[in-house]
Amino acid sequence: MQRARTDEAKDERRLSILMASLDEFYEKGFAAARMDDIARRAGLSKAAVYLYFKNKDALFTELLREISSPKLDYIDAFFGRDLSFEEAMNQFAEFLPTVILNSPMPKMLKVMIGESGGHPKLMREFRETVLDRVICAVRTFLERAEARGEIQLIDADLTARLILSPMPMNGMWRILFESDAEAQFDVSRMFKIHALYMIRALSPSGDLHAS
Amino acid sequence: MQRARTDEAKDERRLSILMASLDEFYEKGFAAARMDDIARRAGLSKAAVYLYFKNKDALFTELLREISSPKLDYIDAFFGRDLSFEEAMNQFAEFLPTVILNSPMPKMLKVMIGESGGHPKLMREFRETVLDRVICAVRTFLERAEARGEIQLIDADLTARLILSPMPMNGMWRILFESDAEAQFDVSRMFKIHALYMIRALSPSGDLHAS
DNA sequence: CATAAATAACTAACCAGTCAGTTAGTTAAT
DNA sequence: ATTAACTAACTGACTGGTTAGTTATTTATG
């Protein structure tokens, strides 16, 4: 195999080890994933992996940081735009299924859930840098829509979480039943229906009891 | 320690080993949980655990079956009653937070997710015996409410899943951030708001586009 | 009733295999 | 020729499962 002599080649190699480890951690879990298998999947020897990462824990930590970092600018940009609530819900319904179906999110979710007891600091970091930002962006968007008189809601933070709740649901369903043909349902259609329901639920034409 | 001589005492001992294993599997994951730790947690030696369970895999299998078995009659009874949709949503909002906060469900969920790659048959079994029944019960209930003209919906199966989606979301949140004080929010209030939104979303007074 | 025998429940110690991390040697690239 | 990237082999710690021995409890006996 070609050696990674340049900085660019080293970065590529590092990333390919990270991606190999994601696959192994996803299939086996952190503890049962073997460094030798990760190395083979990346086309290297086990000892070569240790040239790039101090140990298994460091590999895991850097994997989670690598995966969660690039998504945030897009989320901010999405919710920073001046869309109507209805338009935003519809575009959301187009975008979110792609995260479930075409991104490493379900894999990452499984790896994190499985290992949450062993790395509480990492979990907290992930919440602060990713999840809280997403929830805050949705909440801020909801508050603006409400201020425009476009919607009526009870609690912007909890509503943001409810709007997002099909994401973890679908992520977990995928983790548990990815290879179970009978378990499959139309994820895109579900998000469309969810968007419709949220539009109706938050329509300002009715009486919402704040309890 | 007192020996389990009678059948009843043996059942108790077996159950206490199962519960000890749930705690260890929850904290450490299946692979990293040690049989010696499980035994100590149950107040026994490791070899004694092997008097009750063939091996670690058998312990895991029997744990999952034990935990998921008793809940189903209650669900059937809940949705078999002749409640109005609104009444059912409100009672649902009372009941579901207790599952998140006071039952082993989040622990079980984490253990299953972490180990889903290793036991696909068990995952499928759990879906068939538990999840599909819950979803089907909600769906049947929705169809009846719709037939009474009480609600208007697009797809009963997907709507049932959307009604249930705060459950996995809250379960996941609890798994990841149980000990993270800043992450906490009012679970009961969220379910109440969700019930209100679903009542409004499914109210038959508007126009739902079936796409 | 007291005591011995029987036995199932239990355990400390053992064993073979596994694996993360390391080392001494190899090799591709400059 | 040099050297950094890489690897096969090694090492020590660990663990699931097993075994030989111990012991608590029940049953049998005088």
Image: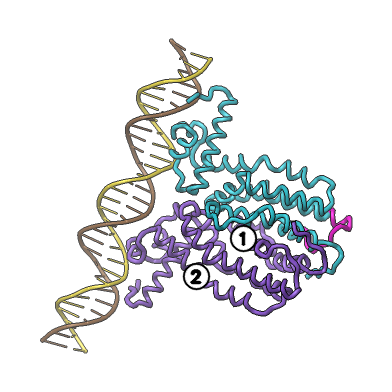
Chain colours: A cyan, B purple, C yellow, D brown
* Nearest the eye: A50 or B160: B160
Instruction: Specify the label residue B208 is tagged with.
Output: none
Residue B150 at x, y = what percent?
75, 73
Residue B134 at x, y = what percent?
59, 68
As for residue A148 lying within the magenta part, the answer is yes
Q: Quadrant of the C terminus of chain B?
A: bottom right
Quadrant in which residue B171 is drawn: bottom right
Amino acid marked by disc 2: Ser
Q: Using residue B61 as the reference point, say whether residue A111 is left or right of it.
A: right
Sequence-wise, which precedes: disc 2 or disc 1? 2
Q: Using residue B156 as the reference point, say whether residue C6 is left or right of it.
A: left
Residue count near mark 2 (Cα–Cα under 10 Å), binned few <14, some 14–19, many ≥20: few
* Nearest the eye: B1 or B138: B138
As for residue A208 lying within the magenta part, the answer is no
Disc 2/disc 1 C-alpha distance (Å): 19 Å
* Nearest the eye: B137 or B47: B137
Q: Which residue is mark 2?
A: B69
Residue A53 at x, y = what percent?
51, 35
Residue at 53 percent of width and 25 percent of height:
A4
* Residue located farthest toward the right when viewing the structure as drawn: A148
Residue B7 sits above or below residue A50 on the image: below
- Which residues are the magenta region? A144-156
Q: Which residue is mark 1?
A: B168
Residue count near mark 1 (Cα–Cα under 10 Å), binned few <14, some 14–19, many ≥20: many
